[in-house]
């Protein structure tokens, strides 16, 4: 097992059962060790089932395009809200990830070879959706020499060619610390580049794949900040963004330290959301964090100088409320420069 299991009590020593108890004879019967009961979700985490004309329209359109969405693959609780509002997060390079983070619902395994036409088909699909702000992400592809950066960049370039005014946010892997992959996306014309630290420093080893480190993620965010200055199509800065899950056992001083480090490398945007266990094989929820605590971290992050903070139990990295803010900020920055 790659990681120790969190919050599992030591298994009790079983008492052999006699043959007249109904167990197999021989005294070797071991009763199954019961799992601790899952915590019941509080009311503030309950959402309506997705529906509405716009939701089903996007669902049908995506089904016919052979594309993956992180909305579905990662079981995002906001899928109904976002799709009903006309936005979706497209996931490139298939639905199989080369990493095995213990919080993530995306399948882990050996991915299929890249489809060279995917960047162009995905761009056409996004344009057909009629949105003016799109988030594009991908699985980790450590099997590729460049981590899939060129494939990622080709989609962004095609999007900008087909719809020059569209604002593009990309949520990227760490490319194993190779900053050439980040440069590829800056050159492609991204407006916002996000890379998630996911959790605090002390929990990184247990929550994320062994190949993902807190310092490596900080270096990616620092490079986005430095290399993206003045590199947007309109001459503005490429914004850097990250996300932190709460409820995995992190302490308050660790969250605060993470925020200080993130601002120290120039990260512009941070989002906080509640970790939810996708299945029994994933990490268990240690705590359901109250909305008041999320409000506290939003206030603290703003005090530290983050440009924008989205913080709430159901907030995710690709959250449409944040997209609306960033769209307004980017357009306002262009107008000011003009």
Image (spheres, helix red, strand yellow):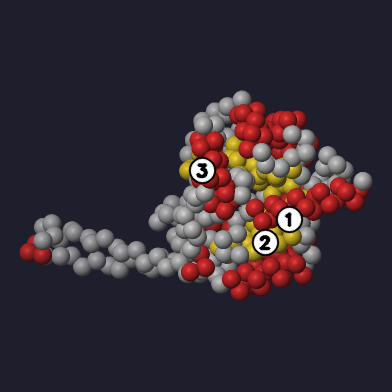
| Residue carrying label 2 | 310
Q: CA distance from mark 1 to mark 2?
A: 10 Å
Q: x%, y% of residue 20?
A: 7, 64
Instruction: Judge left or right: residue 57 versus residue 26.
Output: right
Instruction: Return the residue nearer the eye: 182 or 318.
Output: 318
> How far apart, in angstroms, are the residues tagged by discs 3 and 1?
26 Å
Residue at image point 47% right, 55% down? 49
Residue at which label 1 appears: 325
Question: Label 3 neighbourhood size at 10 Å, few (<14), some (14-19), many (20+)?
Answer: some
Badge 2 density bin: few <14, some 14–19, many ≥20, Cα 10 Å: many
Residue 194 screen position, x and y as percent? 69, 49
User: On screen, 5 above or below 229?
Assistant: below
Number of the label disc, if any, that sits on residue 56: 3
Q: Earlier in the sequence, mark 3 or mark 2?
A: 3
At x 13%, y 57%, the residue is 24
Q: Nearer the viewer, mark 1 or mark 2?
A: 1
């Amino acid at each position: 097992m790659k990681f120790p299991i969190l919050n599992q009590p030591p298994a009790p020593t079983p008492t052999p059962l006699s043959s007249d108890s109904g167990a197999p004879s021989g005294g070797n019967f071991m009763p199954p060790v019961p799992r601790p009961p899952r915590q019941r979700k509080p009311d503030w985490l309950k959402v309506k089932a997705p529906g509405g004309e716009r939701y089903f329209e996007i669902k049908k359109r995506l089904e016919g395009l052979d594309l993956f969405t992180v909305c579905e693959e990662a079981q995002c609780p906001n899928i109904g809200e976002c799709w009903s509002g006309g936005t979706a997060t497209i996931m490139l390079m298939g639905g199989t990830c080369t990493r095995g983070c213990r919080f993530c619902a995306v399948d882990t395994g050996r991915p299929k070879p890249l489809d060279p036409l995917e960047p162009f088909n995905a761009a056409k699909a996004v344009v057909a959706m009629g949105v003016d702000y799109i988030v594009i992400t991908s699985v980790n592809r450590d099997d590729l020499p460049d981590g899939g950066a060129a494939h990622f960049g080709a989609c962004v370039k095609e999007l900008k060619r087909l719809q020059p005014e569209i604002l593009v946010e990309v949520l990227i892997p760490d490319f194993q610390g190779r900053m050439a992959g980040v440069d590829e996306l800056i050159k492609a014309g991204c407006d916002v580049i996000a890379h998630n630290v996911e959790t605090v420093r002390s929990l990184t080893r247990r929550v994320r794949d062994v190949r993902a480190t807190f310092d490596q993620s900080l270096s990616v965010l620092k490079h986005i900040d430095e290399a993206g200055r003045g590199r947007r199509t309109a001459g503005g800065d490429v914004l850097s963004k990250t996300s932190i899950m709460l409820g995995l056992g992190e302490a308050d001083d660790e969250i605060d330290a993470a925020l200080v480090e993130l601002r120290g490398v120039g990260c512009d945007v941070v989002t906080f959301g509640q970790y939810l266990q996708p299945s029994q094989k994933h990490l268990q929820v240690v705590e359901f964090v109250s909305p008041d605590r999320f409000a506290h971290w939003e206030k603290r992050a703003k005090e530290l100088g983050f440009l924008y903070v989205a913080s709430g139990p159901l907030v995710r990295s690709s959250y449409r409320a944040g997209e609306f803010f960033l769209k307004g900020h980017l357009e306002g920055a262009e107008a000011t420069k003009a």
